[in-house]
Image (cartoon, rainbow, N blue to C red):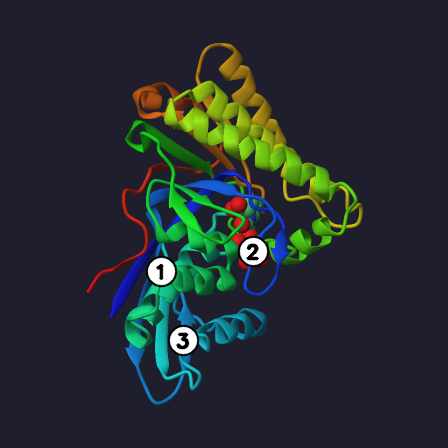
Amino acid sequence: MTVNAPVNIALIKYWGKAQVHPVRPSTPSISLSLKGLDTTTKLTPADDFSFTLNGEPPSDESLDRLVRFIRQYTKDLNVHVESVNAGPTAAGVASSASGYAALSLGLKTMFDTHLDWAAFVEKTANGSGSAARSLLGGAVLWDEDGTITPVEFNHANYQMAILLLSRSPKQMSSREKMAASTKLPEFARWQVRNRLRSTRMMEAMARDDFSTIGALMEASTLDMHALTALDPFSPPYLTKESIHLWHAVREARAKGLAMYVTADAGPNIKVLFKKADHDRVVPFLKTFTHPVLVHDIADEGAHVCA
Ligand code: 2P0
């Protein structure tokens, strides 16, 4: 059986857990699933266990996490898994979201067809919180109660470009950095701000108010990176080049090109813009020396292929 799931990029960021098992996020988050940047996973029933990611065995640390996840569905690990990412792995391009979403759907389909939706979402989030959002296409809310809901949004009007500053894996997992952030006194104030942004984001998306959507996305992003900066000994995700590009986008925006920036647990910069502006935005982004990946918003979330 083969399953596929899209990556998703958060407009309102998930950063911190209210509960570790089952995972409950500290604030709502809102994402867009991206077409063409996905994980395809082949599962074969077996008497023993094997796992490859892009044709290679995963690191011991990743394997431990995968095994814990897979045991939610098959205690004896009776499965061979071959997982392939269309994009870079573990570099802040959300490959763990698409990876765990695809794997979760494959395992449910193979071992637990009757699992109800809420329990399925919960098991998926135990792999990677953001993976829950990759179960659906379009715009998705992952709420504090662990549920996922489609968000009203005319996503066909939009595209997202990823400026690939780095393909190398991040130095510190977002899981560890997130856990460190939750211990900060500032964390409670982040929660208040991000909850408010999430409510305002849903209203802005419903009325297709792009400047408000963009401003809220940039604010949630900067606030998340500011939280991580409160741990003075951990290296920042954003590099000098990420910040340089962000400034360049803001300057072009001031001159009339409507586009907004986000960035996750890595240096790569993602730019949200309207499809109608594609022919102005994409050539602008290509003036920088980095590869530019341009993606539509996916209509479909995780699904069984064959
Ligand atoms: C997000 N990120 O909303 C945020 C923004 C990264 C930056 O969700 O610990 O791999 O597995 O639940 O989902 C990345 O964290 O974390 C993430 P775990 P996950 O997309």
Q: Which residue is drawn at 49% across and 54% down?
A: 146
Left or right: where 166 falls relative to 227: left
Q: Position of residue 270 (x, y in %)?
A: 48, 35
Mark 2 near ligand 1 (CB under 8 Å)?
no
Give the residue displayed 51% in from the left and 50% down from the top. Answer: 167
- If you read the primary sequence from the N terminus, does the residue marked by circle 2 or circle 1 appear first? 2
- Foreground pick, 88 / 221: 221
Which residue bears the numbered disc 3? 73
Q: Residue furthest bottom?
A: 47
In this figure, which residue is indicated by the disc labeled 2? 24
Label 3 lies in ligand 1 vicinity (Cβ under 8 Å): no
Give the number of the disc on residue 117: 1
Q: Residue at x 62, y 59 (%)?
A: 19
Q: In which quarter of the image is residue 83?
A: bottom left
First in sequence, mark 1 or 3: give its number.
3
| SS for callout 3 | loop
Position of residue 91 measured from the top left corner of the image (x, y, whole percent) = 53, 51
Q: How crowded is mark 3: few (under 14 residues within 10 Å), some or many (20 or more)?
A: some
Contact between marks 1 and 3 (CB within 8 A): the answer is no
